[in-house]
Image (spheres, rainbow, N blue to C red):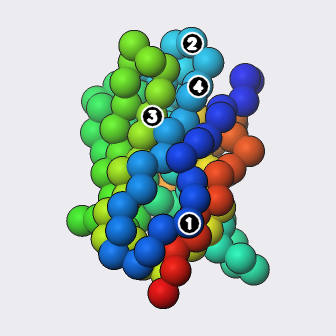
């Protein structure tokens, strides 16, 4: 499947905010679950958030719940991740993913991935 393109990463101070964008091929956002994963340096890729293509429901990892918000814009073929109150442990490469599999918190459930965008939070 077509690859996704993430953008919006960068260096931010602890407590600050950042918004990531994921540009998808036409009709991808409306037909697939769209998720964000992240991989801290030297660690495994972990689930961050997902928004479903049918019910449009959202689900978040425990570590980001209450701080991050996932959303999508069908007209722009884009999914967003608004990150607030950033912490040092949020430092990671953030990946956008599209898929239909379950469970949605597992990276193996997704078939299409972006190249990732770096997020670094200074302590």
Is the C-beta separation of discs 2 and 1 under 8 Å? no
Kindly identify which residue carries mark 3.
79
Give how far apart the Cα atoms at labels 3 and 4 are.
8 Å
Give how far apart the Cα atoms at labels 4 and 1 are.
24 Å
Q: Nearer the viewer, mark 1 or mark 3?
A: 1
Q: Considering only order in the chain, which callout, 2 or 3, is on the residue closer to the N terminus? A: 2
Is the C-beta separation of discs 2 and 4 under 8 Å? yes
Q: Considering only order in the chain, which callout, 1 or 2, is on the residue closer to the N terminus? A: 1
Rendering coords of residue 53 (x, y %): 40, 27
Kindly identify which residue carries mark 2.
26
Rendering coords of residue 115 (x, y %): 74, 45
Kindly identify which residue carries mark 1.
11
Q: Considering only order in the chain, which callout, 3 or 1, is on the residue closer to the N terminus? A: 1
Relative side of 71 to 123, left or right: left
The answer to whether one can see residue 54 in this image is: yes
Tell me if mark 1 has few (under 14), some (14-19) or many (20+) residues whose alpha carbon lies within 10 angstroms of its own.
few
Give how far apart the Cα atoms at labels 2 and 1 are.
30 Å
The answer to whether one can see residue 50 in this image is: no
Tell me if mark 2 has few (under 14), some (14-19) or many (20+) residues whose alpha carbon lies within 10 angstroms of its own.
some
Give how far apart the Cα atoms at labels 3 and 2 are.
12 Å
Q: Considering only order in the chain, which callout, 4 or 3, is on the residue closer to the N terminus? A: 4
Q: Residue at x 24, y 65 (%)?
A: 66
Give how far apart the Cα atoms at labels 1 and 3 are.
21 Å
Is the C-beta separation of discs 4 and 1 under 8 Å? no
Q: Quadrant of residue 93?
A: bottom right
Kindly identify which residue carries mark 4.
24
Is 29 placed above or below 109 here? Answer: above
Is 121 placed above or below 79 here? Answer: below
Q: Residue at x 41, y 78 (%)?
A: 14
């Amino acid at each position: 499947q077509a690859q996704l393109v993430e953008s919006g990463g960068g260096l931010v101070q602890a407590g600050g905010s950042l918004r990531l964008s994921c540009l998808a091929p036409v009709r991808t956002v409306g037909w697939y679950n769209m998720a964000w994963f992240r991989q801290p340096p030297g660690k495994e890729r972990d689930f961050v958030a997902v928004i479903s293509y049918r019910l449009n429901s959202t689900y978040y990892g425990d570590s980001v719940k209450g701080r991050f918000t996932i959303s999508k814009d069908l007209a722009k073929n884009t999914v967003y991740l608004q990150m607030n109150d950033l912490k040092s442990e949020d430092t990671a490469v953030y990946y956008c993913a599209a898929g239909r599999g379950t469970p949605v918190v597992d990276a193996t459930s997704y078939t299409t991935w972006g190249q990732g965008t770096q997020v670094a939070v200074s302590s």
